[in-house]
Image (cartoon, coloured by chain):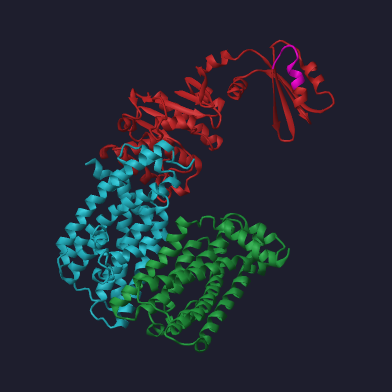
Amino acid sequence: MFGVLGPNGAGKTTMIKVFTTLLLPTSGAARVLGLDVVANTGEVRRKIGFVFGGDRGLYGRISGLDNLRFFAELYDVPVREQRRRIESLLELVGLRGRERERVEGYSRGMRQRLHIARGLLHDPPVVFLDEPTLGVDPVGARELREVITGLAAAGKTVLLTTHYMFEADALCDRIAVIAGGRIVAEGTPQELKAGVREARVIEIEVFGDAEEPAAAMRTLNGVRAVTVTTHDQAQLITAETEPNAELTPALLAQVDGAAVGRVAVREITLEDAYVSLVREA
Amino acid sequence: MNTFRVLTIGGLLAYRALFNWIHPAIYIPSVLGFPMFQILFFAYLGRFSGLRDDAFFVTGNAIQAAGMAGIYASVFTIGNDRFYGTLGPLLASPASRAALFTGRALPIVANGLFVSAFGFVVGWAFLDFEPPLGSLLPLALVILVSAFATTAFGMLLGSIGLRTKDILLISNLAYFLMWLFCGVNVPLDTLPGWMQIVGEGLPVTHAVAAARELIDGAALGSVWRLVAAEAGIGAGYLIAAFALFRVFEREARRHATLETT
Amino acid sequence: MKVLRVILACWWLNLKNLSRSAFFLLTAVMAPVLLSTIAFYMFQAGGRPGTLLYAALGSAVYGIWSSTLFGSGGAIQWQRWGGTLELLVASPAPFVFAVAGFTLATATLGIYSLVATLAWGTLLFDVPLDLAHPALFVAAIPVTVLSLGLLGLVLASTFVLYRNANALSNMLEYAVLLATGMLVPLSLLPGWVTPIAWVLAPTWGIRAIRDAALGGDPVFAIAMALALAGVYLALGAALIANLERLARQRGTLSLA
């Protein structure tokens, strides 16, 4: 399972649309299973499944079962196979028993699951999943992740996009981090974590001007980077420092005069690395 | 806020804002092209069925088409307000309701006039329709009254549309209603009694009858009753529209349902 | 055959989909029924006996046309708004056949109008339903639906490719009603209308149905309708191929 991780607007969806032949590349080439997506469009379409998810993409006034039957026809699934496969897919995604209801009555999670079933109807060797758990409640999302893991285990090649760090970390064998349309890091989750330099992170919540103190902090010895973000009423100054430096008092001295809220000290995580990676881009 | 300004400027701005989809590429086929073919079709059907001369169908359909433009515009003005969420702020403003609505209605009435005139020109250009010169001014008056009456009717429908959600359905139903009951293509007296009664209560009916007499050469004086009837019907619908609107508005404020789409 | 499966699948889906839309059904059925009523009154008041069946049939075919125009013009757009357009394009099924299936369904729904109009005429206006060639009449109906449905294919793609064409659809309703001789014989119209009428499917559809009911040469009209259907399919295929390519270039297959 390959994960593509990046913030909104990074280009994850664009990339998937190119792979699924929905978008023509303006330059360069893309290949799936060795087939060019532009020159061999028909063959590519037969061999891939994709799930974009969301509330749309299904015929609301028709039952889930009828939706699946329809797409099975479009994907040329042999008639004899259809019933068996639809049944096992409904079982897999946990929609057994609800398939005869109209899709307009399905919850978001149910629709997502129906989408996954739809994407697998023709048993494709390659599956693209674009932010499959977006907007799904936590319990439903966990169930979905189990299904997704099962796909890779069944021998399919799965490309998953997400902006949830923990999801990519937990599910994927390899991850690529993209930002601004470029790959900024690639490797197994372990490799990415190892690539994160050891560092200490000090977070200081400030009420009032944070830019000036932040600028001053950057000049301090042992401080690698300082960023300012806004959280509700307060500004959050995040300073990345050498792992063994005790810089908290020095940093706090810079905000002397302003009202200070929460102060926290911790070790750097993959999430911080990810955030700084995509912000640099 | 100065009432006059609300009337004119407010109306114009609102009209432009809500009708920014009306640019020539859409306006011409929908508001002019459609009635043109409607007139041509019924005139030819009239020739085929041997019912009446072209003038009969041109007057009927031109006025009905203008009426429909007014109804669609009114219904959509109110409906769009709700859709774009401008209804709430509008109602919350202290401006006089009457001025507000009149301001919005004026461009609609003007449009109705234009569409009627266009319909008559189509009839004159492509069919055997030659109204006597002396009838043109009285005709304009009749059309003006009819435009007012149908706009008022449209406002009533629009108010109803605030409650139901299907303004499109209501507008289409109105179209069919007028087609059938207003004596547009079939002389009113050939229709069964109950249909005549319904027709008498709708706008357009009396205007069409008056227009037809004027084209036949009658003087304005002899059709004033019909014109008055049309004006009266319009006034009635206007009052009903206002009243209904206030009722719904009060209800919606109580139940917070006004902005739901 | 795979192509047939795709067309049938899309046809069936859209048939179900539209049948469950009260708005669509209401508009599709009411308009022709009301038109026939007006036509009946006009014919009766105008004193032309024996033409009530003529009026009924013309209104019925108008119903098929109205349903097709309304349903097909927006066919591709609705899919886009519903998020299903992408899924259709990305499937291995040739997109043109999928759209054809959809537009054929809109024409098929016109049969509701046909039945409604004829029933209405028989019940309320005593329209006599004696058919000259009943078998050909029954054959003419699906042929009309087919040719109109494929005209719908052309409409569907044109209305997406050229957005201003969409505004024309309102105008086309009456224009086509007039120019194809559904209720007004072509002989009454200026001569230059005739060649235009000949390339429009409803002209042959109504001729086939009318000739089968009232006597004439339905076979010729049926053949012409089928020939036109072929032309529409070819034209539609070209337009759709263009449409798909442009949409994939510009990324307009979905709203986001």
In this view, the residue in front, A124 or B45, is: B45
Q: What x and y, as percent, mark residue B73?
A: 52, 64
The chain letter of the cyan chain reads: C
Residue B235 visible in the snapshot: yes
Instruction: Name the outermost residue toward the front.
Output: B133
Left or right, C45 with respect to A224, comes to: left
Q: What x and y, as percent, mark residue B118?
A: 45, 69
Q: Quadrant of the N terminus of chain B?
A: bottom right
Instruction: Name the outermost residue toward the bottom.
Output: B222
Left or right, A78 with respect to B183, comes to: left
- Please give the name of the residue rendered at 53% of the width and 80% of the height, measured from the top-left corner: B230
In the displayed structure, C17 sits above or below A90; it is below
In this view, the residue in front, B95 or A110, is: B95
Left or right, C76 with respect to A209, comes to: left
Q: Colour of chain A?
A: red
Number of numbered discs: 0
Q: What x and y, as percent, mark residue B107?
A: 57, 66
The stretch in magenta equals A215-224
Residue B171 counted in the magenta span: no
Q: Quadrant of the C terminus of chain B?
A: bottom right
Instruction: Name the outermost residue toward the right.
Output: A257
Q: Colour of chain B?
A: green
- Please give the name of the residue rendered at 32% of the width and 59% of the height, measured from the top-left corner: C109
Instruction: Please identify the quarter of the rendering in which residue C184 is found.
Output: bottom left
In this view, the residue in front, A81 or C34, is: C34
In the displayed structure, B7 sits above or below C248; it is below
Instruction: Please identify the quarter of the rendering in which residue C242 is found.
Output: top left
Residue B180 visible in the snapshot: no
Residue A220 counted in the magenta span: yes
Q: What x and y, as percent, mark residue C126?
A: 27, 78
